[in-house]
Amino acid sequence: MPVPNGINPSFPGAVSTATEAVMSSTASTLLGMGSSNFVVTAGVGAPSHTATKGSLYIRVDGSSTSTRLYVNLGGTTAWTSVTTGA
């Protein structure tokens, strides 16, 4: 089923939601995966919201290799940055 922004992700398994991201000071959910509640979110600024352990956050205003991607390691508001390539 296509999502509002025209992207139609095709993942094996259960994809429960896929919504258009609206960039603001709060995170917008891009994908929610199955019953584990794993989410991929995106937003402006460092993440500070609660998410399930293993969830990912894409920082759209990240300006270095250590401020673009974050992973939630504990299921709380604590996020760890992932160092990416250039």
Image (tube, rainbow, N blue to C red):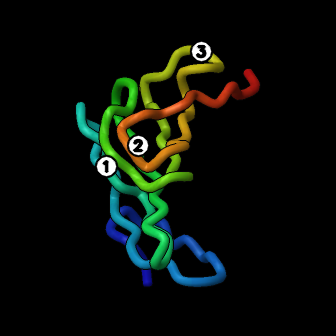
**How many neighbours does mark 2 have within 10 angstroms: few (below 14), some (14-19), or many (20 or more)?**
many
Q: Which residue is mark 2?
A: 42
> Residue 64 — which label?
3
Q: CA distance from mark 3 to mark 1?
A: 21 Å
Identify the mark nearer the N-term, 1 or 2.
1
Q: Amino acid at mark 2?
A: Ala
Q: Are marks 1 and 2 in contact (CB under 8 Å)?
A: yes
Of labels 2 and 3, earlier in sequence is: 2
Which of the 4 image quarters holds residue 32? bottom left
Left or right relative to 62: residue 82: right
Other residues around mark 1 within 10 Å, as few (<14) / some (14–19) / many (≥20): many
Q: CA distance from mark 1 to mark 2?
A: 5 Å
Sort mark 3 into few (<14), some (14-19) or many (20+) by Cα contacts within 10 Å.
few
Q: Do tag 3 and tag 1 residues touch (Cβ < 8 Å)?
A: no
Q: Quadrant of residue 45?
A: top left
Left or right: where does residue 78 sit relative to residue 12? left
Q: Secondary structure at mark 3?
A: loop
Find the residue positioned furthest to the top. 64
Q: Are marks 2 and 3 in contact (CB under 8 Å)?
A: no
According to the image, label 1 marks what residue? 28
Residue at the (59%, 15%) spot, across then down? 64
Residue 41 spot, x, y in % from top left: 41, 49
Q: Quadrant of the C terminus?
A: top right
List x then y, in percent, for residue 40.
Answer: 47, 53
First of labels 3, 1 by sequence position: 1
